[in-house]
Amino acid sequence: MADVAIIGAGPVGLFGVFACGMVGLSCDVVDVLPHVGGQCRALYPEKPIYDIPAYPQISGGALIDQLMAQAAPFQPTFHLGQQVTALSTTHAGFALTTSTGATLTPRAVIVAAGCGAFGPNRPPLADLETFEATGHVHYHVTDPAAFADQTLVIAGGGDSALDWTLTLAQNAKHIHLIHRRPRFRAAPESVKRLEALVQQGRVTLHTPYQLAALNGDNGNLTAVSIAHLEGETKALPADHLLLFFGLSMDLGPIATWGLDLAKHTLRINPATGETSTRGIFAAGDIVHYAGKLKLILTGFAEMSRAAHSVYDFLNPDQPLHFEYSTSRGLPGNR
């Protein structure tokens, strides 16, 4: 039996293994995905991240690799490819049942499930599934090299659409960027870089347009038809269509556990990280409190706070002697 069950194996959940380990707590980690890393690994493994301290730039996949290496000395037990479907209290803590029928009995719980279960928002296009199955329609990029020398149509107006346009334009044959509005919901610096690529002729911008149809035979994409909001239509040659319309989020069973909710997030006491249920804590994008910033580094800080609060909860008569990692060291070096 582990001291803590961490629900979610994204970056914040993985850092939780380290944070809990540093105060002497063992961890079970549960995630519905068949691998660790959450959205960083599933959707953005090659996307550069710029706001991780000490890393001017690091990809989502590399960040997960580093977090796994940091967690390894504490020997967590991972329960992947399964979802926590039920949670109840016991005389010794909690009982968690997963979708595979497994039962975990931690003394405390930390929810680090990001925004819950997620999946891409999919446009209502005829034969979309056919082109998905043949690998011509994509909702995330796992290998940028696969798009080298290809003609791409990218649809979306947020950071993900622009980030991947800027990245893939380095090696793509040409990119058509589609957005239903003339303004983008992306960082101003990204918009400036996009405008430079348009001036260079490497990207063609189509606004205000929206997707109308996919063209090709037997799932082999040859063109994407788009429609102007005033009715004009045209077909763009395309080898691949990349869709960045955001994610649909669902808290799933977490919403039935009686925790105080704020829309699709959990209210916590930011001073402790505890939810409305004693012994259940939370960190990362799933939490809500005044002034919350949805950043990975904010989630790391919240997880550190939660780990110390879990220790206090489990050891009310043994005050924690706070030590910095430089003085405490890691297992085997203490």
Image (tube, rainbow, N blue to C red):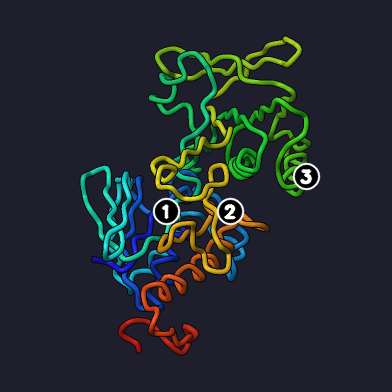
Quarter holding the C terminus is: bottom left
> What kind of residue is marked 1?
Gly
Q: Say which residue label 2 marks.
A: 288
Residue at image position (58%, 53%) is 288
Which residue matches tag 1? 37
| Badge 3 or badge 2: first in the primary sequence | 3
Sequence-earlier tag: 2 or 1: 1
Q: Which amino acid does label 2 sit on?
A: His
Q: In which quarter of the image is residue 65?
A: bottom left
Residue 46 place in picture, x, y as percent: 50, 50
Q: In this view, does 137 lie above or below 300?
A: above
Residue 170 visible (yes or no): no
Q: Report whether 107 appears left or right of 143.
A: left
Residue 249 or 66: which is nearer the viewer?
249
Task: Using the numbered discs, state the Cα–Cα distance from disc 3 to disc 2 in whole angstroms.
Answer: 33 Å
Mark sitting on residue 192: 3
